[in-house]
Image (spheres, rainbow, N blue to C red):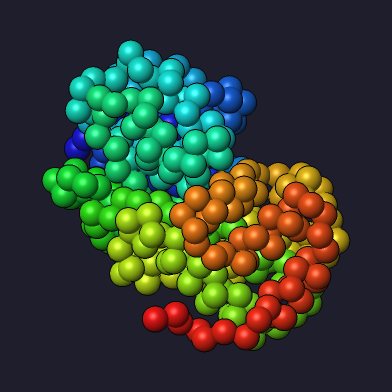
Amino acid sequence: MIKVGVLGAGTWGTALTIQLAKNGHEVTLWSAVAKEIDALSSDRKTIPNLPGAEMPEEVKLTTDLDEAVREKDLLVFAVASPFVRSVAAKLKDKIREGQIIVNVGKGIEEATLMTLTEVIGDELPQARVAVLSGPSHAEEVSRNIPTAIVVGSEDQKDAAFIQKAFMNDFFRIYTSNDVIGIELGGSLKNVIALAAGCVDGLGYGDNTKAALMTRGIAEICRLGVKMGGQPETFLGLSGVGDLIVTCTSTHSRNHNAGYLIGQGMTTKEAMDEVKQVVEGVFCAKAAKKLAEKYGVEMPIVDEVNKVLFEDKPAKESLVALFTRDAVSEYKK
């Protein structure tokens, strides 16, 4: 048994809390939003957006950040990407040297183009930061639907420690040393999922979506390798695996937002309708800037930005992608 602090009581943080408690660990779940903690405290058998899941009685629920991080063997950062830096900044004087932190969020900070593990490391240089990612809808993880994901750390002892903490009969964890590859796969697939949702919203078929997903992973891989990621990572759980689940499932908030945009809603209207943080919208501008910085061609990412922020109709963007100059599938 270890002591774990989970920061963020959204669906993913809550689902991981349930798994950690089920594994026999002493878990404290924190949220800055008092109503989230109050709702869980008053009814542990009814969790918003996680039907059929229950919060174990032994989990401590708190809005006190000191209590959440004090004397913990592992901290789990399940904070939405726009708030990762501000939460990390509050921890500067609260955590010890060598504290193991695993980021489970997905995104890229637009202002700095840092991944979320880099943001945490920037604010908390005394910590050892890893990443946990892969095809894993919270709705299914919370109900013990068999799931496999990957933990990335430059220190394989830390990766093995996190693997052991999370792994059980329904939740399989692999290890990797490719932190940047895992983070980019998990973040950029949200942008492609918005495009996949638009395809469905426009009423096109499986052929269209398969083409977009395949070319989407090609774009992600091109950028990821240029930034130091390993090609194999993008063919694995945090690459192709996460792309498939996010582009095809009704659980996917990015796909659902894209679907609504494809049907004619504005970006804001779609985000309001989904009622959860749509990470791909926050990541899209950063992805475009990274592509420009590293000289990588990412036409799908370009068109998604035009749809999201320049009010270009999704159908026109799809036509633009399909009428680009004829090229070879792979450049040698």
Nearer the observer, 29 or 255: 255
User: In the figure, 150 relative to 164: above or below?
Assistant: below
User: In the figure, 321 relative to 274: above or below?
Assistant: below
Which residue lies at the image location 37% right of the left edge and 40% below the top edge? 117
Q: Is residue 210 visible?
A: yes
Q: In this view, which residue lies farthest toward the top?
A: 93
**Residue 331, position as x, y percentages in the image:** 44, 80
**Residue 50, position as x, y percentages in the image:** 56, 49
Residue 40 lies in quadrant: top right
Which quadrant would the C terminus be assigned to in this image?
bottom left
Residue 115 lies in quadrant: top left
Which residue lies at the image location 58% right of the left edge and 53% below the top edge? 288
Q: Is residue 30 visible?
A: no
**Residue 184, position as x, y percentages in the image:** 43, 54
**Residue 157, position as x, y percentages in the image:** 14, 46
Which residue lies at the image location 47% right of the left edge and 28% below the top edge? 85
Nearer the observer, 134 or 315: 315
